[in-house]
Image (cartoon, rainbow, N blue to C red):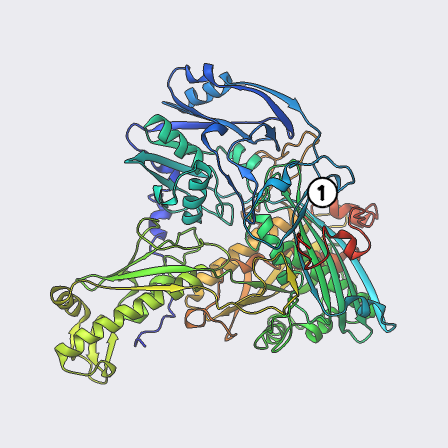
Amino acid sequence: MADVSATMDLRRRDASDKLRGRTRYTIDRYLPGMLHAAVLRASVPAGRIVRLDTARAARMPGVHAVVTAADAPGKIGIGIADHPLFARDVIRYDGEPLAAVAASTLAQAQAALAAIEVEIAPLPAVLTMAEALAPEAALVHPDWREHEILLEGGARAGNVAWEATVVRSDVDGAFARPDVEIVESTFRVGRQNHVAFEPRAVVADYEDGRFHIETSTQVPWTVRNATARLLGVAPSQVRVTVPPVGGGFGLKFDLAIEPFAALLARASGRPVRLVNSREEEMLTCLFRENAEIRIRSAVTRDGEIVGREAVVLMDCGAYGGEQVFLTTMTAHTLGGNYRLGSVRLVSRAVYTNTAPNGAFRCCNGVYNTFALERHTDEIAQRIGMDPLVFRRRNVLGDGDLGATGQVFEGDVLGPMLERMDTLRDPAAPPRALADGRLYGRATTVGTWFVFVGPSAATVNMNADGTATLVTSGVEIGSGSMMQSLPQIVASTLGIPPETVIVRAADTDAAGYDVGVGGGRTTVSLGAASLSAAQEVRTKLLKIASEWIEAAPEDLVMRQGRIEIAGAPGSGRTIAEVAARAQAQIGPISGTGAFTGAGVQAMPGCVAGHFIDAIDIPIFAVHDCEVAVDPETGHVEVLAYRVVQDVGRALNPRAIHGQIQGGVVQGLGYALHEEVTIGANGRVCQNGFETYRVPLAQDVVPVEISLYEGAPSIGPLGTKGAGEVPILNVGAAVACAVANATGKRVQELPLTPPRVLELLLDRKQDLALAHIAAAWADNLVRPHNQSDRS
């Protein structure tokens, strides 16, 4: 291996330009002759299109192109292809696209939208999951049986877009035992908006029979392939490049507005720019979904969890989207953290006539962890055991089975809880503060995972001793593309990380990649980059060994030189060797690829899952102290501590930044942020005036301890660090508030009115009547029974 450590405190090379406003995001891109686009959206949640006439709009001043559903024949989706680009005959949510216009100016494009003649016949709408699951409910997709199936195994019917189940061991037997307490809990959470500072934006061109799409996305290959599918062209006809991205958090982990711009560019013969307004972002954002959860556990008096069952309802909105995939994650989040003797879980993505939802940092793990940890505290209270003692007794350890039957490696959560003990003030906490506010503290645990998937990388060795890294990775603000990947390549080649040039994502230049998200950049792209750099290293050492007349195994690469081990100053510079290689055999390059190892689940345990078991689990322990004002219901976070499993910290400074940011974003979810749907099906919060995000005065300094050494197949032992910091925050705050108030916390966010309701005993226990009492009655079909059986 290289004589240079990959662990370093490397500053981000893009920080200076970003701080000075020099970075050019997609929203800053302009091309000569560029047109401006606007999208006409429906203003009803459900209806049938009687008439859509664009003739007058096409004649408006400055208009160069108008496109509708007739121009985009395909449908896309995950698991099922249920989503057209434009509404076809039927409108399924307020804000659904009907047509798009490109004109010389944005004002002209918007004027043309107003000239489009639309006649819509209203249809019955289902706006909540309770309404959607009611007997005889109106179907969001009456034609659901006709959708193309992209992944076999998921159960579907009516307004259930997808259903994933887990069953392991004898759950009925566990609940029938005479020596157990049965504890049942119910929870509800609202939607959360990503609030990326750069809205979704795209500039598209059509030249030489190919589309070129510049876009603010986390998933260039998804944009390429999905755009091609919608437009009915070959994927090779679409090239996607990605400038720096001004915030993603999962919002841009799916196709967005790119096909509109592509269609208009082809129709007009001109480049087309389309940027969402903040209102469009708020009304049509792929929110973190609202969810409803019921958990039951059978627990012995000495604290053994012998059985658990749960039902999770996830509102996917009008189309299946990411939620179809996210049903998988319930097994690993709600079914994580603790040893379970037996378990059965069902996670259902439910259609409603509301804006589609999508992925958001730690996806459904944030609310499943909230539900699981609140349920854990309720178990401890029922059996009279200290919550921390209960957690220490039950957290997953080496050789334990996860919900799907996979075997976990290493004792991680137990030692992490011990680490948290050393961070806490050992003094007994006060029951109330001097100012009369109620004090509460809680410690929670969380289980997440790295979404691995395939990645590719190429490293080109330049004749001047620098290296160019080519991947489909995207810099979305986490710094992985600017820090961890250059560190991995540089340490392998013995050169400074500042001399590793990272090429912006371009689907024409780099191999396939799932996308940046799920904590996978450093792991998947890092592993591919390491493999590519090792190939370059091997080639350089071979050339150098012939020149220096020493065996390759006797040479080291360090500080920009290839030298004989133990003889500093001997040998040649890497630049000299690279130049010699280029002259003798041609330029030196290496390629690498990576995908998950494919950890096995227990046969027969899972149905409808995209990931049966997790390659790289990540654990987190959070501790939170709060003060609750009994007169106003305001919750103040007094202190926050995090112990995070990182595998190996390549850049501790960068990880600390991600944890601080993730916790603050989680505090917004826990205390402030909530999207609601009005009776007309429209999102009520359409801007920063009505949607409360954490402000500067809400930021709490986080005390951080990085836990290293847990098993990982990631390069150099790494794990993803950017996604998991938000995982436990809602849980930690909720448990702390429950401890402060002595009240049962069942909903997030804990806004002052909601907390006051608890304090004044005006909040009835949450009843979710549309979740059947018998677990099996919540299923579209029995676990592991195919549609054909």
Q: Residue at x 27, y 66 (%)?
A: 496
Q: Nearer the viewer, residue 397 or 57?
A: 57
Q: Residue at x 41, y 48 (%)?
A: 220
Amino acid type at mark 1: Met
Residue 27: give x, y in percent of width and height: 39, 37
Q: Residues within 10 Å of mark 1 (few under 14, many from 20)?
A: many
Left or right: 615 as drawn, with respect to 457? right
Q: Please, is residue 507 above or below residue 605 in the view?
A: above
Task: Please identify the residue farthest to the bottom as the structure is shown.
Answer: 566
User: Would you say residue 752 is visible in this rendering?
Assistant: yes
| Residue located beneath label 1 in the image | 129
Quick one: quadrant of the C terminus? bottom right
Q: Quadrant of residue 700?
A: bottom right
Q: Nearer the viewer, residue 446 or 327?
A: 327
User: Would you say residue 559 is visible in this rendering?
Assistant: no
Q: Residue at x 70, y 56 (%)?
A: 346
Q: Nearer the viewer, residue 426 or 561?
A: 561
Q: Nearer the viewer, residue 595 or 306?
A: 595
Residue 430: give x, y in percent of width and height: 73, 64
Residue 341: give x, y in percent of width and height: 73, 72
Left or right: 152 as drawn, with respect to 263? right
